[in-house]
Every structure is written in structure tokens, then in C-alpha cells.
Amino acid sequence: MTFQFLSPKPSSYTNKVDADGDIDMLLKTERENFETKVVTPGETITHATQYMGGHGTYISPETNQRLSSVAGVVDRVNKLISIRPLHTRYTGEIGDLVIGRITEVSQKRWKVDINSRQDAVLLLSSINLPGGVQRRKTEADELQMRKFFSEGDLLVAEVRETFQDGSFSLHIRSLKYGKLRNGSFVIVPPALVQRCKTHFHTLPCGVNLTLGLNGYIWVSKHTTQTVEELAIYSNENEEIDQENREAIARVCNSISALSRHFMCINDKMIMLAYEASLNFPVKDLLKLDVMEVITSEVSEKMILLKAGMRR
């Protein structure tokens, strides 16, 4: 008697393992439907009945399907589905990377605009001293607070704590955080910015990209200097040549095109939009018809990429 061993059938589950070691048993088709999906009011989110509804969802009494009550991005945590509205203030979580602008210098703290309902607070004790010196902050440091950050300065920080009134406490105790220079500032709806493993990217076009989860994005010149060599509280911008200026402007305009057409924003989407924009001069990228061409090409490429991944 001969035995024939058949190869196992390909699993229809994603089998992704998270940081806690839990296996995600969501079907591949369901995973693709939930990721980067923008819905409008009344649109069907899912036909499955095992999901719990969060903010922005309701069940249709006629079809028993879960529908969206607002326009936004589908957000799924295990079996809980909610909608993040497109036009809303930033409501963050501990550990979020945000970009903000200093609005006020007060006693032992700065107030920072991070696109939320209230200004966030950055305490003097939550920053790194020049040179990375680790010591308690003194009265002399308090008198020199404007040498660290003054009104109008842009910075990248991490959410340290959230409060019930909707405000946040920030910190920049890592050398990768600090004052932003040598670049351009872009504002998009916070719901469009995707959460990634890292929000610091160096794009193939030669520019640095910092994606703030609060909808503030910073596009800057790429530097080969190490973090220790940089003056983290300096206000002087470096010399930027014409080629880098055009690359920064093209990336910024590509982000604006994605935002205008409510497309999710991450480093891959930005690079697809950047490549599609190379057929046009930088000054024409903010024209509505050019934006339509760029975003249509990005959508077609994403469809092809998803089709290739299914195979």
C-alpha cells in the first residue's frame, strides 16, 4: 500500500503575531477590507455579525449590517470597530509621536499647539539639556528657557501622559526628538496619517520625512551628521541647494494631493505620489487637475500591488 501525503491547503487567515505573541485570526479578505479604508455616512463597514460597534457605527435594522454614521477611517482593535472622523481634532494616546509649535513660554513649562482641543504641556524637566547632560533642572535653566524653545519654534515630541480634559503632557528625552529645522511644514487631517513602526523616514529622493500622528508633517533636508553632532536647540538653518529644495517642495505637494483626495498617508503612499508627480513641474502640482491625475495613478498602483500580494 502506498501513502500519498498531500500538501497543506493555504490558510485563509493572516496569522500575524503581535508584540504580545497573539495570533491574528482575521481572514485575509477581511484584513484587506479594514486596512486603509475610508468610509462615508451610510456605507457598509462589514457584513459579519461578530464585531462590536464603537464610535461612528450603527446596525441597520433592515439588513442587519454594520454601517458608518460619519465620514472617516475604519479603525479595528480585535473585534471592536470604530470610525475616526476625517475632520476632527487630534485625540492621541500615550506614546504617540507628534509635531507641535510653541505658543507660550511660562514657568517651568512650554505650551505647545499639537492640533488638539487644548495646548499640550512640555515641562522643563521633560527635555534633554544641550550635550545630553543628565542632571536636575535649576533656576539658571529656567531663566534660559527661551534659549531652548521660544514662541513659534517647531518640535517633534512624544506623548507622555493624557488628561481627562483632553490635554497632553509631552517629553523629548530622546535625542531623536527636538527642534525641527531645514525643512517645510505640511498639515493634513490626523485621521489620514497611518500608525507605523517608525514615523521617521529617509525617502529614496533624498529627504527626511517625519509623520506626526496629530496631522502635522515635517519634510526636511537629509543630513549625514549623527544626532550627537547636531545642535538640537539651534535656530540656524543649513544651506539647502536648489535640487534639495525642489525635492522637498515636490514631496510636500504630493502629500497635499493625497490629503485633498482623502487618501491614507504613509511613506509608501508618499513615494508613489512623488513618482507620479515627476511628469509635472513642481509649481503645477497644486492644480486640481494635476492632483487628480497623481492620485488616480497612485490608486491604480495600489490596486496592482494588492493584486500581486494576493497571488
Image: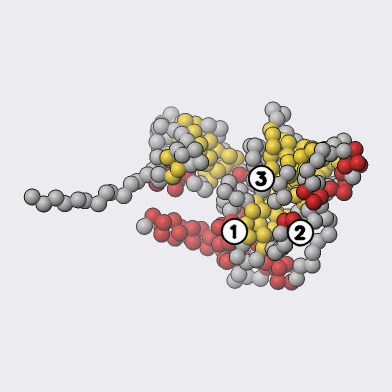
Q: Is residue 282 above or below residue 260?
A: below
| 10 Å crowding of disc 1: few (<14), some (14-19), many (20+) | many
Real-space Cα distance between discs 1 and 3? 19 Å
Which residue in the structure is indicated by mark 1? 270
Q: Which residue is mark 2?
A: 229
Whole-number angstrom distance, CA of label 2 to CA of label 3: 23 Å
Q: Which residue appears at 83% of the width and 59% of the height?
A: 236
On the rendered structure, is 206 left or right of 20?
right
Image quadrant in which you'd find residue 235: bottom right
Give the residue at mark 3. 97
Identity of the amino acid at label 3?
Leu
Q: Is residue 241 above or below residue 172?
A: below
Question: Where residue 198 is drawn, which disc sits there?
Answer: none
Q: Position of residue 110 (x, y in %)?
A: 82, 40
Q: Amino acid at mark 1?
A: Ile
Residue occupying the point 49% across, 61% down = 301
